[in-house]
Amino acid sequence: MTAWDSEVDLLVFGAGAGGMTAALVGALEGLEVLLCEKTAMVGGITSTSAGTIWVPGTSQSVRAGVPDSIEAARQYLGSVLGYRADRAMLDAFLGAGPKAIDDLEARTEVKFAAATAHPDYLSNHPGAAYGGRALGALPFDGRKLGPDFDRVRPPRPEFLVLGGMMVTRADIPSLLAPFGSFANFTHVAKLLARHTLDRLRRNRGTRLVMGNALVARLLYSLRRAAVPISFDTSLTELVQDDGGIVGAVVDSPAGHRAIHARRGVVLATGGLARNARLREQLFPTAARPYSLAPEGNTGDGIATALRSGAALDAHVATAGLWMPCSIRHHQDGTKALFPHIVLDRAKPGLIAVNASGRRFVNEADSYHEFVMAMLELDRTTPTVPAYLICDRSFIRDYGIGLVHPRTRKLGTFIKDGYLVEGRTVRELADKIGAEPDGLETTVATHNEDARTGIDQAFGRGSSDLNRINGDPANKPNPCMRPIGPGPFYAVAVWPADLATSAGLSANQDGQVLGPDRQPIPGLYVCGNDMASIFRGTYPGPGTTIGPAIVFAWRIAMHVAENVHPIATPTQEPERAARDRIPGA
Ligand SMILES: Cc1cc2nc3c(=O)[nH]c(=O)nc-3n(C[C@H](O)[C@H](O)[C@H](O)COP(=O)(O)OP(=O)(O)OC[C@H]3O[C@@H](n4cnc5c(N)ncnc54)[C@H](O)[C@@H]3O)c2cc1C
C-alpha cells in the first residue's frame, strides 16, 4: 500500500498548452485539481511559440467573416494523411474542436480570434482553407498577472526587439516605416511608449502576444479558478494498482511526495525532444543536434508511462516536426538558434541550395516541408546544413534570419561567421564549400525563371501559402526576383525540432493505450506526449497546439464523466490494422 502524502481528483503534469488546459477545464468541471510543473515557470515550448491553434469549423471563423467547414477539413485531412489517417481520432478532434474553443471563451479568459488570411500549409490539397482555421490567442496585458508575470516563460530572445518587446507580424510594416503614414506613426509611438514604461519596472515588455499571450491567458484563468500550481515539482514515477494508475511520485522542493489521484493522471510534459535515448532511437541522425524545446522537456511523461505498460506510437511519417534554423555563435560561448518560419524564405530573391550548389525544395513551402526535403536528399547528397542564398538588396528589403531588414553594417555578422559574403557567386560557393559550377548554374536558372515568374523546378509562388509570405508588390511572382548583382550572401540552416509527433498511443478521450490497444485506467495524455493525430504531417498553422487543447478538453470532460460521445464513423477493421503497421 502506498502511503499518500496528499490526494486530488485530477493530477496534471506539465504546464504548457496541454496541461494548463486540462487542469483549467477539469477545475471548471468541479474536479479538485493539482497542476505540477517541473520548472519555476509555466509555458514550456508553448510560451516560445507563435501560439497559433489549428481548429477547423469554429464560431470564431464565422465571427471573423471567414466561415470554415468541418466537412472540408475532413476532406483536406483525408487527402494530406492518406493511409495514415485514423478517422476515429480525427473525428474526435474535429467534432470537439469548436465546442472546446467556445467553452474556453465562455468560461475563462482564454479568448481567440481567427485569422482571415492564414492558409493551410498544403494548400494545394482539396478542402484546404485560406483563412478561418488558424486561431490565435488575443494579446494579453501581462500586468494583470501581478507577481505571476515572472512565472510566464519568456519568448525566444531572438524574437524580441528593443530589449524585450514582443512584436507580431502585423507590427513589422509599421516598425520598418514609422513615418510611412499617420497610422504607422501612432502605432509605433504607442508600442514604444508602453514598452518604455514597462522597462522601467520589468525586464521585458508586458504586451504579450502569440504563445506568450496564450500561456498568460491560461495562467490568469487558472488563478481565477483557484487551481493550485506546484512549481519545481517533477513527475518521477506513476503509481499503479490492479485497477490502473492511481497516483504519482513527484520530486518537489519538499522532497519526494506520493500524490493520490482519485480520478486520473494527465501527462502533458511536452514530448521527448530532450530525451537523449528516444531522440537517438527515433530521429534521423542529421536532425539530432538541435532542438527548439526547453531543456526540461526530457520526455518524463512518456518514459514513466512506458515503464507502466503504455505503448509508444512511432508509426508516424517522421518522429519530429521541423523548422530550418540558423545558428549564431556568441563570444561568451552561447548560441542563438533562429527558426526561419515566415519572414525570409518566401520573399523574392532567395534560394536554398545544398553542397552541390543545387536547389532541393520550394523554399516558400512550410518550414516542416522544407526540412523534410532537406533530410530526404541528405541521404544521398550532403544537404545538412543547407544554405539560404541572396544578394545585398534582399537583406535591405527583407532581412535574413537574425539580420533585420535595413541593417546597414553587416560586418559583425560576417565576422562571427553567421553571414558568409562573396563578391561573386563562385567566391560565395568556395567559401561555403558548395560546387561553384553548380551554384552558378542554379542562380542563372533561377534568375531566368524569376523574369517569367514561373519556377520550373519547384513551383515557387504557386500556392496560397507561398504567395502570402512573399512580397505582393513584386511582380509577376511575389516569391521570385533575380538574385544579383553581387555581393552575394549565404546563411547556413540546420533542422531543429519544434515539436515531436511520436508519442504515447491514445484513444479519442486521451486515455493512454497499452500494446493491446486497451486503455490503461486512470492515465491520460495530451500535447506532445501524445502521438500526433496528424501522424508526422503538418497540415497547417497550429498543428500541435490545436490538438493539445482539444484533447486536453476532452480529457477533462471524460474524467469529469461529462463527456457526450461524438458520433464517429468507425474505421473498417482492415484499414485500422493497416494504420498500425510500421512504415505501411
Ligand atoms: C518557434 C516555435 C514556434 C511554434 N509555433 C507553433 C504554433 O504557432 N502553433 C503550434 O501548434 N505549434 C507551434 N510550435 C510547437 C508548439 O509550441 C509545441 O508543440 C506545443 O507548445 C507543445 O505543448 P505541450 O503542452 O505539449 O508542451 P510544453 O508547452 O512544452 O509544456 C510542457 C511542460 O511540461 C513540463 N515538464 C516536463 N517534464 C515534466 C515533469 N517530469 N513533471 C512536470 N512537468 C514537466 C515542462 O517544463 C513544460 O513546462 C512552435 C514551436 C516553436 C519552437
Image (cartoon, helix red, strand yellow):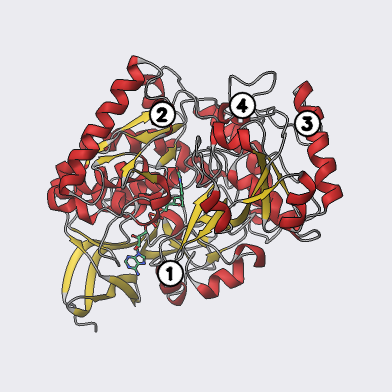
Ligand 1 positioned in quadrant: bottom left
> CB of mark 4 within 8 Å of CB of mark 3?
no
Quadrant in which residue 191 is drawn: top left
Say which label, 2 or 1, has the lower sequence index.
2
Examine the rendered structure and indicate whether residue 43 appears above or below residue 239.
Answer: above
- Give the SS element for disc 3: helix
Q: Position of residue 259 (x, y in %)?
A: 22, 72
Q: Which mark is residue 447?
A: 3
Q: Which mark is residue 170?
A: 2
Q: Which circle, 3 or 1, is nearer the viewer?
A: 3
Q: Is mark 1 within 8 Å of ligand 1?
A: yes
Provide the residue designation for mark 1.
298
Give the amino acid type for the residue marked by disc 3 in the picture: Asn
Say which label, 3 or 1, has the lower sequence index.
1
Residue 575 in view in this figure: no
Image point 27% across, 75% down: which residue?
250
Give the amino acid type for the residue marked by disc 4 in the picture: Arg
Say which label, 2 or 4, has the lower sequence index.
2
Disc 4 from disc 1: Cα separation:
38 Å
Give the amino acid type for the residue marked by disc 1 in the picture: Thr
Image point 42% across, 39% down: which residue?
52
Disc 4 from disc 3: Cα separation:
18 Å
- Give the SS element for disc 4: helix
> CB of mark 2 within 8 Å of CB of mark 4?
no
Q: Which circle, 4 or 1, is nearer the viewer?
A: 4
Residue 417 in view in this figure: yes
- Give the SS element for disc 2: helix
Disc 2 from disc 4: Cα separation:
16 Å
Image point 14% across, 45% down: which residue?
224
Provide the residue designation for mark 4.
467
323 left or right of 194 in image: right
Give the amino acid type for the residue marked by disc 2 in the picture: Ala
